Amino acid sequence: MKKLVFILSTFVALTFNNNVVAQGTIVDVAVGNENFSTLVTALKAAELVKALQGDGPFTVFAPTNAAFAKIDSATLNSLLEKKNQKALANILTYHVVSGKLAAADVVAALKKGNGKVELKALNGAILTVLQKDDKIWLKDQNGNYSEITATDVMGSNGVIHVIDCVVMPK
């Protein structure tokens, strides 16, 4: 537990300096970070950029390029096609929660929920946040896990938490 608090405190301290400088919307933040280029491509293909540039606030669990690389390339390429726009939008909105949940909010909810909290994603499906092995994880509807590897990347309309796997709704 001490390790978890230290890690979260470190992330908050490191990202605090970023919070002082206005970074634009969460989409602007993602566009400005090369580790999110696949996510940005997917957001454009799903026509979700405008929605996530809105007022929000939003909490985005953002998969990195390495997270997207874990998906079979043929499947990923197929999802990026216009004919699969609806399916891609469903997957991407599963990574977004209404409201701004900073790391401290997530930790408080986990404490209140005995290490587990369920969040309703924008696509209407449930995303479970769990604390185990001194780490914070997302568990998707298929029972797959994604580790939250960085927290509190602030945008003017919400917050991004970085994850290491793409979570999938049923």
Image: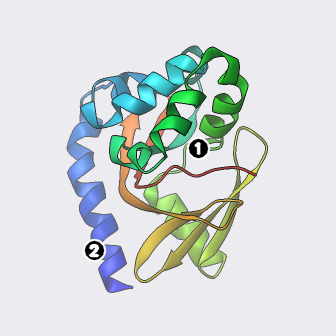
Answer above or below: position of 113 versus 66. Answer: below
| Left or right: 85 as drawn, with respect to 163 | right
Neighbour tally class for label 2: few under 14, some 14-19, many 20 plus, Cα within 10 Å: few
Identify the residue at image location x=58%, y=33%.
57
Whether residue 73 can be seen here: yes
Residue at image mark 2: 6
Residue type indicated by callout 2: Phe
**Residue at figure coordinates x 48%, y 45% from the top left:** 72
Residue 32: image location, x then y, percent: 28, 25
Q: Secondary structure at mark 2?
A: helix
Mark 1 element type = loop
Relative horizontal placement of residue 2, taking residue 44 as reference (left or right): left
Q: Is residue 53 visible?
A: no
Query: Residue at the spot x=34%, y=29% of the render?
Result: 37
Could you tell me how many numbered marks the image carries? 2
User: Which quadrant of the figure has residue 75?
Assistant: top right
Which residue occupies the extreme front position in the image?
Answer: 74
- The residue wearing badge 1 is 95
